[in-house]
Amino acid sequence: MIVFRYLSREVLLTLSAVSAVLLVIIMSGRFVKYLAQAASGALDPGSLFLIMGFRLPGFLQLILPLGLFLGILLAYGRLYLESEMTVLSATGMSQQRLLGMTMIPAAGVALIVAWLSLSLAPQGAMQFQLVLNKQDAMTEFDTLEPGRFQALNDGSRVTYTETLTDDRANLGGVFISEKRFGQDKKDRGISVLVADSGRQEVRPDGSRYLILENGYRYDGSPGMADYRAIKYDTYGVMLARPDISDEVTDRDAIPTKDLLGSKELRSIAELQWRISLPLLVFIVTLMAVPLSRVNPRQGRFLKLLPAILLYMAYLTILISVRGSLEKGKLSPTLGLWWVHGMFLLIGLGLLYWEPIRLKMMSRRGQKELARG
């Protein structure tokens, strides 16, 4: 029991440290991406941390299996390097017994991953998509920031205002530049609107207009001398009607109960993927225990790179087979299970190869002594 607690503590502490580092790296990259979208006006800056919270379960369901895999390699590698595993082996600690002890904390990690993949991650993905739908329903006035150029419609429209009231209804120092396209979708030049002030007006039918006052409109093509300037006292610009939708179409956001019994290939692939993540925990544990065995003369990091490559191959094949299953190129009965079976055999081979090799060397040595 003392040995079990010691080994479990070493693995779980290393797992926590590795997972925390990986989580910070991944979330930092995603936060920078969302921050860039907020800077361009595509996202509300106030919803950034809410979005990151909804995405957290989806990150953790992939980070924890990798964290456990690296945690076993690093923790047990240190024990081999400091000859603690040699002492344990001398007292009767076999690889199979070590694997059995390691599977107990791994089962706890698998339960957490199952909870994340089957429940929390789909809920978070659903809330994330609802936030995005809400963002899509926002008008220019909802995302406009004074003193900043805001690109919309893939950069075809740029809006700027020098001042904006707190109720986001009145603007001052307005500039709008928009590309003009004909019915053949060819570029017909640009239109530039400048005005001293502007306000938003909502009609009874729900359409929105930007009413500009005391300004100019310029129409023409860059590099051509055919610009037309129009001075106006009042000018109305119709704002695009927002597409308000509560429909959730992302497969990651579909509740697990709705996937059960479905005959659709996308649903079958998604369900098998969610079940695969907890299975992944047990199989990578089976591979990590023999891979953590190192010679003190070789160092603890000798097998780290090949082990990571093996893990990445496992995950990459799973993702690739998932895509093939969605496209109907693979039987749902075979599905993702053959990938787990293949790496299960690899794990068993790694576990029993070293004892078999030692027995073969021992027999060879006995034969040489008999001949001598």
Image: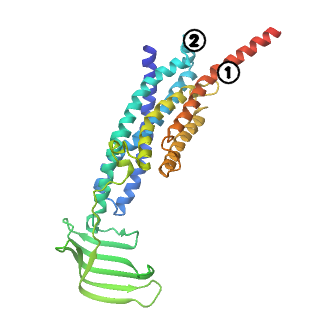
Q: Place residue 369 in its image quadrant.
A: top right
Q: Position of residue 342 (x, y in %)?
A: 57, 35
Q: In the image, what residue occupies the spot 58% across and 16% down?
A: 86
Q: Position of residue 40 (x, y in %)?
A: 37, 63
- Vertical side of 241 occupied by 65: above or below: above
Q: Earlier in the sequence, mark 2 or mark 1?
A: 2
Query: Does 167 sit left or right of 217 as displayed?
Result: left
| Camera-side residue of 176 and 306 | 306
| Camera-side residue of 215 and 106 | 106
Report the coloring of the rendering: rainbow
- Vertical side of 14 occupied by 274: above or below: below
Count numbered badges in the picture: 2
**Residue 98 appears anywhere in the view:** yes
- Vertical side of 242 occupied by 79: above or below: above
Q: Residues within 10 Å of mark 2 (few under 14, many from 20)?
A: few
**Residue 295 appears anywhere in the view:** no
Q: Amino acid at mark 1?
A: Arg
Q: In the image, what residue occupies the spot 67% across and 16% down?
A: 359
Query: Does 265 sit left or right of 176 as displayed?
Result: right
Secondary structure, mark 1, is helix
Between marks 2 and 1 in the image, the one whose residue lies nearer the viewer: 1
| Camera-side residue of 237 and 263 | 263
Q: In the image, what residue occupies the spot 82% across and 10% down?
A: 371
Q: Place residue 294 in its image quadrant.
A: top right
Q: Quadrant of the C terminus?
A: top right
Residue under circle 2?
A: 90
Residue under circle 1?
A: 357
Secondary structure, mark 2, is helix
The span from disc 2 to disc 1 (Cα, nearest Å) is: 19 Å
- Vertical side of 354 occupied by 372: above or below: above
Q: Amino acid at mark 2?
A: Ala
Q: Quadrant of the N terminus?
A: top left
